[in-house]
Image (spheres, rainbow, N blue to C red):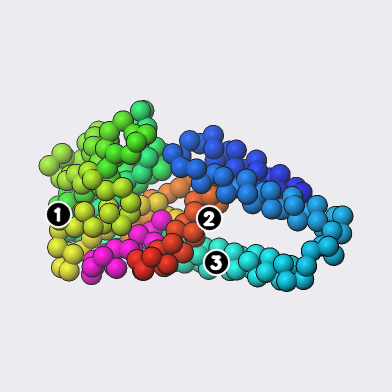
Amino acid sequence: MLFIIGAAAIGYGFLILAAASGTKFFAIWFLIGAFFIWVGYMTNGNHWRAVPLAVRIALAVLVTAAVVIVAAGTACIMTHFHDRAPDGLDEIIVLGAQVRESGPSRVLRSRLNAAAAYLAENPDTVCIVSGGQGPNEPCTEAEAMKEYLVRKGIPENQILEEDKSTTTVENLEFSSRFLNRKEDSVGIVTNNFHVFRSLKLAKKNGYRNCRGIAAGSTPLYLPNNILRECLGIVKEVVWGNF
């Protein structure tokens, strides 16, 4: 069973690699797979007796900590997985994601479609598209996002561009020049697995009245996205961003 789980994890890593997400996070699935295969080998051959007790205890503690972190992180993510915002928000901020030569990635299109649906019903709400240009992107994310929304029928004068940010923290910090963080009602548009962390970062950044607008995500890639988010939550806690 451990060998099967390990092989499945490695196979999933190749699937994420093939998705060309623009990051190297797929490598963690290779590490997870290798770990399960190694544990399977150690268990099947009864090699654990040769491992010092202190090492076995340390390994058990690390594995337990990892399981607890992922379980707790997933529980936090699920608390905002289906967030919907009320009508009449002053602004919404659409957080950027990968842009390809062909246009916004699937993840980003989900965010933009959710934003377009909200804006169609709330024509007085200002939309801020937020995202700079990465080294593997043909243009700024903000430019591609605005173009996509305009094609969806959103008036060009309803959309403001923030085109310098490279992280979620910067998305929220740089977008704030278009609004009043203490008084405005603001919707944060991002994928369902990313809403929890985004809202926490927004509140840390001084947003007093922010709500999540959860866009969909591809079920096949959800385990990868949730695992990445769990590690992102840990990073933000360690760096004091929450």
Give the image location of residue 113, x and y in percent: 33, 43
Q: Residue at x 27, y 33 (%)?
A: 139
Left or right of 240, for residue 150: left
Q: Which stretch did the figure color magenta? A: 194-210
* Cα–Cα gap, marks 2 and 1: 33 Å
Relative height, residue 61 to residue 222 (above, below):
below
Give the image location of residue 85, x and y in percent: 30, 60
Q: Nearer the viewer, mark 3 or mark 1?
A: 3
Amino acid type, label 3: Ile
- Per the image, label 3 sits on a secondary structure element best described as helix
Q: Which mark is residue 178?
A: 1
Left or right of 203, for residue 1: right
Left or right of 183, for residue 99: right
- Whether the residues at callouts 2 and 3 have beta carbons within 8 Å, the answer is no
- Name the residue carrying label 2: 227
Indicate yes or no whether the magenta region holds residue 221.
Answer: no
Of 167 and 11, nearer the camera is 167
Relative height, residue 116 to residue 187 (above, below):
above
- Residue 232 visible, this angle: yes
Q: Which mark is residue 62?
A: none
Q: Residue at x 17, y 46 (%)?
A: 160
- Whether the residues at callouts 2 and 1 have beta carbons within 8 Å, the answer is no
Of 89 and 77, nearer the camera is 77
Q: Which mark is residue 69?
A: 3
Indicate yes or no whether the magenta region holds residue 203.
Answer: yes
- Residue 60 visible, this angle: no
